[in-house]
Amino acid sequence: MKRFIVTVDGTAGSGKSRLITNLSSLLDGTYRPITAISSGHLYRAVALITVTHVTDIAADINDAKAGQLLNLVKLFDLRLIDNQAAMNKLRMGLGLLKAEEVTAMAPFTSQIPAIREYVNDRLRETVYSLDGLVLVDGRDAAAVFDQADCKLFLTASDEVGARRLGGDVEAVAQRNRIDRERLIAPTAPASDAIVIDTDSVTEGEVALQALNQIENSAPEIGALMRARP
């Protein structure tokens, strides 16, 4: 069975995860299997390891601390299992990964080149083992899967993103700034990505726009959608 890869990148609070969920529901019964993959689960797991095992890395990301963190990540055999971050095959709940200190740490540890390489390798390992439609969300999924069949990029203002996340506008603005300005794979639309501004539209409207782009990019899926009663 052919594999179709759809990447969904975007700014903080732009609705990437919600879009993946909504697309899975809209396409269920039309195209199977459908698999959702989130790079954020792995980056948050790295941040959790950092918070619990490495001191002061956010204040001073030097080579020694980066190497220590990478060794720990490898020791814990961090990877995705059914789109859940797992250490030594033990899955971690989202509640743990979304703890305040983990959320604050993630922008710093995700800048480390060796960590990004490790996470990207695990993502490719997971996605290329799958068939069917694979929906991948993240901040630079289009860079990881540059041959994806369809690339979407969602935007939201810092104010709207903060409201959706229930967070502080300054914290969201800082996260977006760090992601936008990092040297490796900064968060930005790929040259062939479709940009969707989510500020003033509903989740359903975003999903329908995205679905239209997927149909155009993957004719086989489009034909199946048009054949539905």
Image (tube, rainbow, N blue to C red):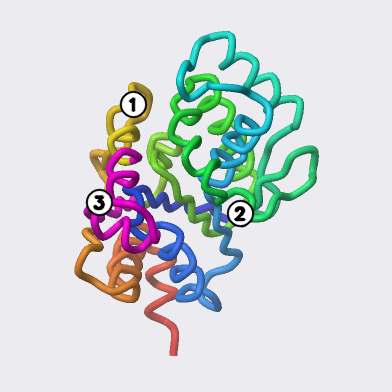
**Nearer-the-camera pick, 12 or 127:** 12
In the rendered structure, find residue 29 and report the number of the disc placed on it. none
Q: Secondary structure at mark 1?
A: loop
In this rendering, the answer to whether 64 lies above or below 176 is above
Query: What's drawn in magenta, residue-wise?
Result: 151-175
Q: Amino acid at mark 2?
A: Asp
Q: Label 3 sits on what residue type? A: Asp
Mark 2 lies on residue = 131
135 shown above or below 51: below
Q: In the figure, is residue 35 to the left or right of 180? A: right
The secondary structure that dominates the magenta segment is: helix
Q: Position of residue 45 (x, y in %)?
A: 62, 40
Label annotation for residue 158: 3
Quarter occupied by the N terminus: bottom right
Q: CA distance from mark 1 to mark 3?
A: 18 Å
Q: CA distance from mark 2 to mark 1?
A: 32 Å
Task: Tell me if residue 43 is in the magenta stretch.
Answer: no
According to the image, label 1 marks what residue? 182
**Which of the two discs, 2 and 1, labels the residue nearer the N terminus?**
2
Q: Earlier in the sequence, mark 2 or mark 3?
A: 2
Q: Residue at x 43, y 42 (%)?
A: 141
Q: Nearer the viewer, mark 2 or mark 3?
A: 3
Q: Is residue 160 magenta?
A: yes
Considering the numbered disc 3 on the image, is that residue within a helix, a strand or a loop? helix
Q: Judge by depth and name the residue closer to the eye, 49 or 35.
A: 49
